[in-house]
Amino acid sequence: MNKPARFASLSALLVLGVVVSTAGAQGNKNITYLTPQTQTEGYTATLLQLSQAYTRANPGVRVQYQNAPQTDLSQKLQLLAASGSLPTLFSIDQPSLLQQLNARGQVVDLEQTFKQLGIYNKLNPVAVQLNKKVAGGKLVSLPLELNIEGFWYNKQLFAQNGLKEPRTWDDLVKAADAFQKKGIQPFAASGEQKWPLTRLIGGYVARKYGPDVMDRVKAGTLKVTDAGFVEAVTAVQDLGKKGYFGRGVTTVDYQTAVDTFLQGKAAMFYMGSWVLANFNDRAQNKIGAQNIGFFNFPTVKGGKGTLADWSVNTGLGVAVNAKQYDAALGNWMKSVFSNYGDRALAEQGRITGFKVTKTPANVPALTRLVQQRLDTAKNGYLWFEGYFSPKATSVATDNVQPLVTGDLSPQDYLQQLQSALR
């Protein structure tokens, strides 16, 4: 069903930087796969299930599962890369390391490879764009997840108070004002986790400057002390100073924030689509899935960003060892990744960076909603700290707590962050 002849072209081989081995051409292959996930978890479970089906039809091709804790993953990969013994496929959690491996020709150019295999159209363009962003412009990791972020809201509370889904920041603040006056907490948020609050800053500046805002910061053509950042940080601080995140927000943990929303105690909740696991759990969800809506980060006055731009990420990347790429691996990849998006959705209700062609009838309504929104996305942008160094990330997140309580000015917050970025 596959066409190894596609790899016979010398020019194609030069582009891919790979070697077709005799064993591979004969269809035999031992594929090693290193990941921090368990065999029954997330994308690893889907990948192994699809591979098992392939092995039944092609007994000479097998996947050998290997596990490493995520805390040790980067160091392990560096050692394996140095000794020329990287696994066939491997999860990788540091974009900078992935770029190094690509510069050395140690990972497969997946855009070229998928086009050669005839399955490039299986990839979601937004996921491709995201993975290229974190890898210096090249698609060198598989988007086995696709998470989208936005505001979840209690449709019943909005209807009871005569409010519509906000489309602008002013709409959002007006809705928050209305709920606060009625004694309803406007937003559930985990200030103890910190990042849920910096996500709001990231969303605001993406609307103010456009989805490439943090690329410009990374390139040094824009500073976070710019007026638009001050406007964004001030706007988020105002929400905190007005008490819209509830009492003691800086001590609220993640699960408490989820429960606050799902028990109908807060009207809105900014979060990624990984929270669907909680929303689709009837034991946790007291307001009912039918009463939950979802909208994108609102536009802001004079901003360049649009509602077609979404905050998305693809989770942990998975790269392919160029040294081990051959016709047998190409055939396996074509089979597995032609069906990956459909299988992940059908078995786990997971949305991935692969298009879905067969939507099962029992997909939860909220999962369908997220998929529909993803299908409308034209541009994706990373989370606020996506390009930051560990030091700058700590400054951004640690200081957001005193920021929302009014104990740190927006100017000081941004000045300290700009200093950390140098």
Image: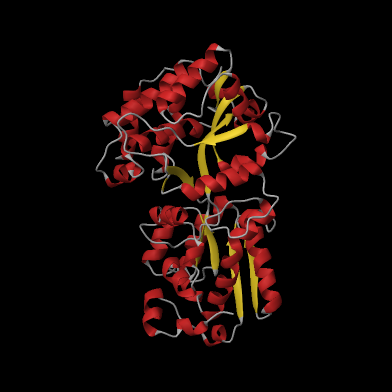
Q: Is residue 122 above or below residue 221?
A: below
Residue 26 sits in quarter:
bottom right
Q: Residue at x 66, y 73 (%)?
A: 54
Extreme right residue here?
Answer: 283
What's the coloring here?
Answer: secondary structure
Q: For the C terminus, which image quadrant?
A: top left
Q: Residue at x 47, y 66 (%)?
A: 120
- The answer to which of 7 and 62 lies nearer the viewer is 7
Residue 16 sits in quarter:
bottom left
Looking at the rendered structure, the number of numbered marks drawn on it comes to: 0
Left-right relation of 40 to 335: right
Q: Is residue 224 above or below residue 372?
A: above
Q: Is residue 288 above or below residue 313?
A: above
Extreme left residue here?
Answer: 221
Q: Position of residue 256 (x, y in %)?
A: 63, 28
Q: Position of residue 407 (x, y in %)?
A: 41, 17
Instruction: Tell me, yes or no, if residue 262 can be seen here.
Output: yes
- The answer to which of 316 and 380 lies nearer the viewer is 380
Q: Position of residue 253 (x, y in %)?
A: 60, 29
Left-right relation of 61 to 143: right
Q: Is residue 54 above or below residue 23?
A: above
Q: For the N terminus, which image quadrant?
A: bottom right
Q: Position of residue 235 (x, y in %)?
A: 39, 24
Left-right relation of 195 to 302: right
Instruction: Tell me, yes or no, if residue 37 can be seen here.
Output: no
Left-right relation of 249 to 7: right
Q: Residue at x 47, y 37 (%)?
A: 296
